[in-house]
Image (cartoon, coloured by chain):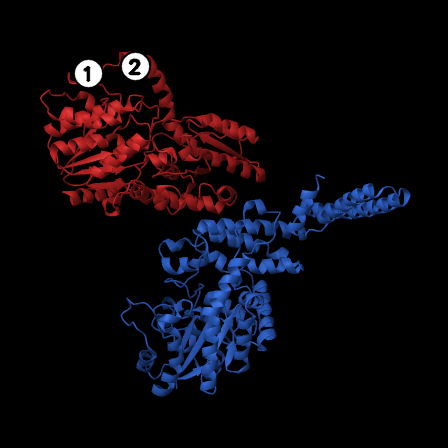
Chain colours: A blue, B red
Amino acid sequence: MSTICLYFQVHQPFRFRNYRFFDIGDEHYYYDDYSNESIFRKVAEKCYLPANKVILELINKYEGKFKVAFSISGIAMDQMELYAPDVLESFKALAETGKVEFLAETNSHSLVSLKDEDEFRQQVEEHGEKLKKHFKQEPKVFRNTELIYSDEIGAQVARMGYEAMLTEGAKHILGWKSPNYLYCNAIDPKLKVLLKNFKLSDDIAFRFSDQSWEEYPLTADKFVGWLNQMGKEEETVNLFMDYETFGEHQWEETGIFKFLKSIPEMVFANSDFTFSTPAEVARNLQVVSAIQVPYPISWADEERDLTAWLGNELQEQAFDRLYELGEQMKKITDPVLKKDWSYLQVSDHFYYMCTKFFSDGAVHSYFNPYDTPYDAFINYMNVLSDFSLRVNAAVPKNNVEMEIANLTGIINEKDEIIQKYEQELYELNKQLFSGTKRTTSAGKTKTANTAGAKKAGTAKKKSPARKTKLAKRKPE
Amino acid sequence: MKVLMFGWEFPPHISGGLGTACYGLTNGMSYLEDMEILFVVPKAFGDEDQSKLRLIGANDVELSQKNPHYEKLLEKIQFIEVNSNMVPYMDPEDFYTQISKDKEGSKNYIHTHFTGKLEFTGTYGKDLYQEIANYAVIASEIAENYDFDVIHSHDWLTYPAGMAAKEVSGKPLVVHVHATDFDRSGGNVNPSVYEMEKTGMNAADKIISVSNLTRNTVIQNYGIAPEKVVTVYNAVDPVVQKENISVKKGYDEKVVTFLGRITMQKGPEYFIEVAKKVLQKMDNVRFVMAGSGDMMIKMIWHAASLKIMDKFHFTGFLRGDDVYRMFSVTDVYVMPSVSEPFGISPLEAMQSNVPVIISHQSGVSEILKHAIKVNFWDIDAMADAIYGILNYDALSEVFKKHGKEEVDNLKWENSARQVKDIYLSVL
């Protein structure tokens, strides 16, 4: 018996605004709300909503014989809450059918698994909580950002208690082996490893509408024909792809939704295949062997390695500088800082800095809001510089910074006292001289102003609007 | 194939990018098979590198009285004899010396029409229009006496010469647009220069532009049919590391450099504004404006009024090795040109391992990948790029690594090959 395992990745980055170096130390809001919202809405209308509708229909129509798995990054869930509650609702509806499995991943869609096991575990837990909150599911299977996997990462995931993990069926890892079996981790055989059949997956995800492709046009009939041609002993066909394949990378006009709709029909009519979720595959199939992956692999580009994110000096420097803050971040409880920290780690930021796009063109530039990797790097480093200042202020790294933090605290305290006295002075003055109305009102404005300015100086988080207002009024 | 080429200058006697480009192109052509070039300049000094081509100075050509074309030609070119002080395409240093020389020397200037050889200065002085006309006369003489297949004219000064040669010989004419008056004047086009440019372009069988930016100007502002205009990018000769040019930096500060003519076309005021922005945020940096030009005094006042003169330096015009010395202490090179048909100097900076920031309004931005590109008016973006390169060291390392490699791959030979294809298309 052979089965088809469908898993779709849902992720949208949280893009930074154009953050100039003049903003460093002054403005702490990093995000491009307009493009984040408009892009998310666009993808929601073109992909998430119509595709969810199709899948819900299919699940109902085949009474549970059709099933799929999703991995939704924490960043994407955050954006659904912000911009597209309707999308979140439609995923919840899918979850309620009981035929949809949600996979665990890092909350920030980050590359942290390459850097720090503690932080890695924490981000996975964070993501798990979000899944529980929204979909009432406890994930059993893990998928890492961009399907990044190595023996070591697999062992870490096993220690977190997951049963299985997904990754790329990269040629250089498999050699003569087939991705259509269940494997296990080389260090900890308890962790099952599902490998993506990249040929068949990419036929749908990348080549579906490519008119220069010799197999164009791809129909469900033809696709199921290919499945039938495979040897009977092949056990699972793992089709892993971005969910945006449906309606966003491949537009509706290409017939991608019709293809999706007719796949189960053709499978049930013309083949012996069934559908399974990753957890079912991991439980039902026998492991055939361990898979050796000494160096990390991913599902990106021809090379299936990490060079799209950590392939040049820019990316390495940005990545190292970011995780230099890791130790300090462990002591931080401020929710705003924590949120920024998690958004800074989104893998897409590093993807934008990739210089490979000069040769590996199309895909990279399609997703990239920056003209060049250099622009991306400068913008990121500006944001990171500001963020480091805030982290250092909150958790001083050395004695000097400690002293500065202490002194700032003392100044702030004294400011408050001065402010209090000024207010008292003003009250007393008012009682002493009940002069003409004009002088009183003038005096009042002035005192209120200084008090306001002091307050703005004390409280670190001030709104820019308020600040300019005060600045404008000062010369009076 | 034999090419009759008209230029206005040839190394080592050059004042700007035109002579360098002509030399590079002809040099690149010498690698191609079956290419013979006869290069005409107004004045040959005798120390030019003639290993790759044959150089003729118009001042050495003797006119034969019999030639019936002169009268007609002179009549035709008459309109360009406008008495104007507008001196295009010239190094401002030369401009000042030229103007003063002309004032003194104008009386001694002997016009030896029809009496044998003609006088040429080969510069861009006050009698430019007369020289252009004379040059065309000589061109027709040369066209009579030499054998060639195609005519190639570099920039508007030599268009009349090319047209004259075409008229005499009936051979096809290719004109090469290195710049238009729109670039030089910022929109206030000199009508007689424009007229000469347009007449030349109309008369040409094919037009070569140095970038798509220039190609668009030619099509839109001169009304030329798009299929007649082909872009061939310039290249840069590999630097020969002469001696070890290095300057000891007596200060531990970063250096940001502008290098070029201080004229409106180059956008010097944006560089000053950007310096102000960067200096507000960081202290250990100095800005250098190297070059001279008609806006220099104004720029000094501008920088002074922003109170940044303690960190902002003017070097005046740099020659020869001084350019490389300047590059050797430079951390970022900025070219905020408002309108730059091509722009070879960022390539020279990259050869010297200097990261560059260039404006989108330059032809060179069409071919460079490893450079930061901004709009010339976008001071914020420019300041941000400078700050980024100075503060995030991975950036300059990547630029050094890839930039030099990229520039080394731009070869004149490739440009020459494209030009040869254009010749073949008009034959």
Q: Find disc 2 in the rendering and name its residue.
A: B106
Marks 2 and 1 on same chain = yes
The image quadrant of residue B293 is top left
Identify residue type, mark 2.
Ser
Query: Nearest the camera: A233 or A34?
Result: A34
Q: Residue B323's x, y, as percent?
A: 39, 30
Write the residue at 42% across / 58% down: A307
> Which image quarter holds the N terminus of chain B?
top left
Q: Mark 1 Cα within 10 Å, few/some/many (few <14, many 20+)?
A: few
Query: Nearest the camera: A87 or B352?
Result: A87
What is the secondary structure assignment of the residue under circle 1?
Answer: loop
Report how far apart the C-alphas of labels 2 and 1 lie in the structure.
14 Å
- Kindly give the residue lying farthest to the right in the view shown: A432
Q: Find disc 1 in the rendering and name its residue.
A: B112
Q: Residue A340's x, y, as percent?
A: 59, 58
Identify residue type, mark 1.
Thr
Write the residue at 38% across / 23% down: B93
